[in-house]
Amino acid sequence: MPPDFWTVIFPAVSAAFVASIVEVVEAFTIVLAVGTTRGWRPAIAGTAAALLVLALIVLILGPALQYIPIHVLQLVVGVLLLLFGMGWLRKAILRSAGVLPMHDEIEAFAEETSELETQVGAPKTLQWIAAIAAFKAVLLEGLEVAFIVVAIGAGKGLLWEASLGAIAACALVLIVGVVVHKPLAQIPENTLKFGVGVMLSAFGVFWTGEGMGIEWPGADLFLLLLALIFLFVGTAVARLAKSTFEKAPA
Amino acid sequence: MTIIGDVLKELFKMFVADLRLTLAILSGVLALFLLLHRALIDPTAAGFLLLLICLLVLAEAVFRETLKKRRLGRPTDRSHDNS
């Protein structure tokens, strides 16, 4: 087992895996709506095309980033991860505090289904529209996964490990989705989003610091401390925000 | 063209979910980078300062949104924030 397995590889692959679960569940809802409304052919074609585009993005961008000097790369990737991770953490905190509504897969499924049902045109045109809907959903949700995979891959040379985490999440959601054959509304999406936000924010601070020439005490081990601090502060801020929000005048 | 437009919009949203949070983080990183570059701050202290800035910016962004939503009332419209 590599010496940095528990401090770097495991958190990195877990972040890619969990983030992918969140995004794939959202994409699955739209693909399911397309499949049940317009048939599985356009749903599968759109999904496969989007997955191909995403795979190309990762395969081209991932190795290309290795030619950038490591400190510059860590700084850029660190700042981007920080912005992305803190964006997720902010939203997850606001949702867990009840300030923002939770993402509702059943509602998203109903919205997409009714949108597809209201469209009129020749059967072939409707099939195309459905395939494009599936393509767009998978591409847009997958962009965040592709970014995480590329960023984690670039920061510590874990492109394949992070990709495997994302592929495993896709396979898991697909298997569960095929078995239950309805939107996966039972997945604790916000808790997962909170966890990923914590991990990506920690990675962001760690790599931004390394990119600026900071030597963290305890080296890679400090990453876990950063994650614990973000988790603790995130939970405390969520509680405070909840009580502040509940004081709202009736 | 709509797909390309939506992809660009999604990419923008990924890093600028909250404009003030994004600007605050970028300003903090830039300020620390300059301080470190001119050797005006100890590198380890800069690391802890970076962490502190991030936590404060996160808390400010959450409470700003909480107070804004409190003024507007409870969340009812899911269509604007359902990602």
Image: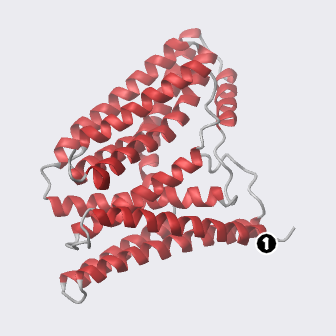
Instruction: State whether residue A2 appears in this view.
Output: yes
Q: Is residue A10 above or below residue A216?
A: above
| Kind of residue at disc 1 | Lys
Q: Is residue A240 left or right of residue A31?
A: right
Residue at coordinates 22% horizontally, 44% vertically from top-left? Answer: A1
Query: From this viewpoint, which residue is outermost toward the right?
Result: A250
Could you say where residue A76 lies in the image, as x and y percent from the top left? 27, 61
Q: Is residue B50 above or below residue B12?
A: below
Quadrant holding the N terminus of chain B: top left
Query: From this viewpoint, which residue is outermost toward the top?
Result: A123
Q: Chain of mark 1?
A: A
Could you say where residue B16 lies in the image, as x and y percent from the top left? 46, 59
Residue at coordinates 49% horizontally, 34% vertically from top-left? Answer: A24
Q: Residues within 10 Å of mark 1 (few under 14, many from 20)?
A: few
Q: Determine which residue is flagged by label 1.
A: A247
Q: Quadrant of residue B26?
A: bottom left
Residue at coordinates 40% horizontally, 56% vertically from top-left? Answer: A200
**What secondary structure is marked by label 1?**
loop
